[in-house]
Amino acid sequence: MIPGAAPESPAPPARPWQRSALLALAAVALVLGVAWAVARSQSAYPFYGSVINRPEPALAFSGTDGHGQPWTLQPRGRQTLLFFGFTHCPDICPLTLKYLGEMRARMTPEERDQVQVVFVSVDPERDTPERIREYVEYFGEGTGVRVPEPELSRVAQAYGVAYGQVPVDGPLKYQINHTTATYLIDASGYTRVMWDYTQLPDVDRILRDVRYVMNHPREPQAARPTPAPELFTAARLAPSQAVTP
């Protein structure tokens, strides 16, 4: 069981970024099917995940790692599997990290050296750097990152991630509804593919996508703009049930 204690203070009132994130949940879900269909149609390779073909590189951002040290996303030269979640999540987040760990375990040592897993907390009020590190390391090798508000809201928006607090009964006071996608950033710094959490159990197909991107990093001049690119970083939005420790 992941260590951690429930907070004693009541949940704070909703902030503007929280209200905006909650409003985004329904809107993103409505356009999800169309976005995936259009993105898939633009790729010659039959990806298992949904293709992202944005013309600009993935946003570089900074935070604090599990050792309390400054951390900056540096995807160039190495692939990044990026997921936004929180440590009190009992289902989607731990399963995501579990499947990503299984996928990395099937890689060769040389391949593993080229891929990093990054977990960004969408619950900076409760998730301390130490707690995030313990949570991520419980499931295998990876980096847990805490990004404070309002920077977290800016980063999440850049990746098409929506999240927000939902009050619940019990000692945890609130849970987080959030986008459940995992994003693959290639060694050139471009976001190439995303998988919804429902796809992750098929570890072999995830690995196939990763290996293809590993061998085919995007050249800057090859990037093509697509209609409404912000839609292609959206994924299924699902609530995570709050649990007591």
Image (cartoon, grey):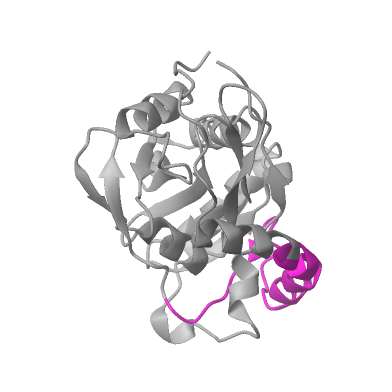
Q: Give the range drawn in magenta.
A: 27-56
Q: Is residue 150 above or below residue 97?
A: below
Could you tell whether 16 is left or right of 75 in the image?
A: right
Any magenta on residue 40? yes
Image spot of residue 204 (x, y percent): 65, 40
Spot the residue most to the top: 1
Image spot of residue 132 (x, y percent): 39, 32
Image spot of residue 48 (x, y percent): 70, 55
Instruction: Report the quarter where the C terminus lies.
Output: top right
The foreground one among 65 and 225 is: 65
Image spot of residue 128 (x, y percent): 34, 33
Residue at 27% over, 44% down: 64
The part of the image, by quadrant, that contains residue 225 is bottom right
Could you tell whether 144 is left or right of 102 in the image?
A: left
Spot the residue most to the left: 69
Residue at 38% over, 59% down: 150
Residue at 49% over, 42% down: 12
Residue at 65% over, 36% down: 92
The part of the image, by quadrant, that contains residue 24 is bottom right
The foreground one among 175 and 216 is: 175
Q: In this view, does 162 lie above or below 171?
A: below
Q: How many marks?
A: 0
Any magenta on residue 100? no
